[in-house]
Amino acid sequence: MISAGTFHVITTELVVGMFALAGIAYLLLVLDKKRETADIVAHWAMLGGLLALPLTIIFGIYANPTEQISNQLLANKVLLSFSALGISVGVLLNRWLNKGPISGRLHPSIGMVACGMILLVASLGGMYTRGESLLFFLPKDIVLIFPVWASTILLLMGLMLISKSAVDHRRG
Amino acid sequence: MTSAKSGGEGDDIRSMQCGGSCHSDPALNATSAAMVSVEQPSSKWAGLLTTVTVNITDFPESETRIVGVFLLTNDQGAKDTPQHEGWTIVADPNGGVVNYIETRVSNGETSVSVTWTLKAPVVAGNYTLLASIHHGGVGNSVSIHGNSWPISFTIDEPPEDLPRLASTFTPPNTRLVNQETIITLETEDVTDYIVEMRVPGAQSVTLDVVEGTFTIPPAINSGSIEWRATLSGVGPDQQTPWFTLIAKEEGWQSDRVELYLQAFSLLFLMTGLVLVSNRKPRAEKIDLVGVMGLPQPDITAQIISEPQQHSTPVVEHNPVISTIPPVPIEGLPAGWTMEQWQHYGEQYLQGGLR
């Protein structure tokens, strides 16, 4: 039987490839070059990566099926990948709601941050499996786990922001 | 696999990975100079606990000195784990339950021994075990592999009255430093037993057994101790293998529920923040016709003719524009675009940019 770890690697390649492409396209948007093409490539590539990202996360979780997570790298991977997922969803929703290219540098910059976070997650994976990473200088063994009440507050804040944004969008 | 993974691959259940070394491509793989051997199991009764030790000697020069050791049943590279032949791994040398472990050969040493605790297959018969190792060399080395000769032996049905540990008993593998371990032996056909404990390689001491339970004192540092029981009953006395109990420092741990709750919180929070970041301000709408009595310049035409990336809000039926200063009667300054006017028009009107 093929293990969850193998599927995790396959889907990770998909995610990293898509997000790397999206990152380059967002960089072009930040630099105001080839705006029309870069806009299309950035958002479609990010959407492709987003479709594979939940699978990657699920296979990653099944690859280490213990009740306790005892490695800081794995915890950082989970937190970073979910954060990147959230940013990417926000970026794509903004683009979709805008019904056209978004001017300015803020939007593509946020897109680049999401791509950078995904690449960082992939780098952490390399550190976990092979003990090697190009980003060896980053402190990867520091992880902040919030108590349940703090996470619940953050969750409610997030839902409120999304609701507020939805209401504002309806009002036009 | 063409080069050794300097950080190792991690303990796991793995089939043998010769990496092609058996096909002799010296550019990609190499055969280890180390000698690998497997000792006969400490006891050979079907369904009962036993130990198997793998000895590695003449370990060659290696940068990391990490060696991966496989306990296998054949060298075919598939269906070769002990579990495939009915063995149950009760404890591996690192305190887990896998057939592939990584260990480190101490500096200045050229040999290392590792021991697995196994539950023998329940079906009596002839069985084979072998060990395989892989490790790196010096520098950016290729992957280096080596195999032991297989050992063959017979597993027999235990006599009915043989004093033994119950098939349901599983010895503990690991514990935390500064934590004592209380063990209650589950036995069959046993009337009495004594328990010994030792630090590996040292003299053993006898532990007190009270009502079938004994206590292994806490360890001050990380490391391992071994214990075994001598079981007495109607049949001949039996000694269990030396069981290894590894003491580990309490490491970092997080509960999955807490972690995933935080992860989903971050997901929604990040989505919300990004969505809000693009929210257009509900700015005052300025009717240019009515402001300062200025006549209406042809802004609408200019804006419509602009490429769509300038998302300045425009109401087509009523030329109203948000946050844009009124355009002078003579029109935009020479060479200015509406976007520039939107940002700098106020300053221009105040005379700052004339």
Image (cartoon, coloured by chain):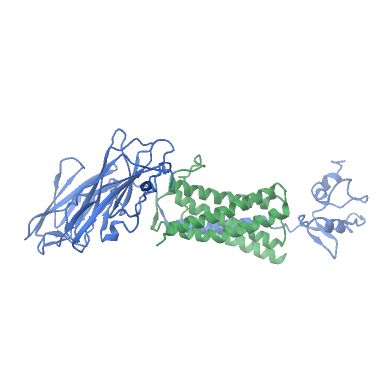
Chain colours: A green, B blue
- Between residue A144 and residue B123, name the one nearer to us: B123
Identity of the residue drawn at 34% across and 47% down: B250
Residue A56 % position (x, y): 50, 58
- Residue B268 appears left or right of B261: right
Residue B91 % position (x, y): 27, 53
Identity of the residue drawn at 68% across and 50% down: A106
Reply above or below: B58 against A156. Answer: above
- Residue A117 appears left or right of B100: right
- Between residue B42 and residue A28, name the one nearer to us: B42
- Between residue B156 and residue B167, name the one nearer to us: B156
Image quarter in which the C terminus of chain B is found: top right
Reply above or below: B124 against A35. Answer: below
Residue B145 % position (x, y): 35, 44
- Residue B112 appears left or right of B272: left
- Residue B145 appears left or right of B202: right
Identity of the residue drawn at 83% across and 60% down: B320
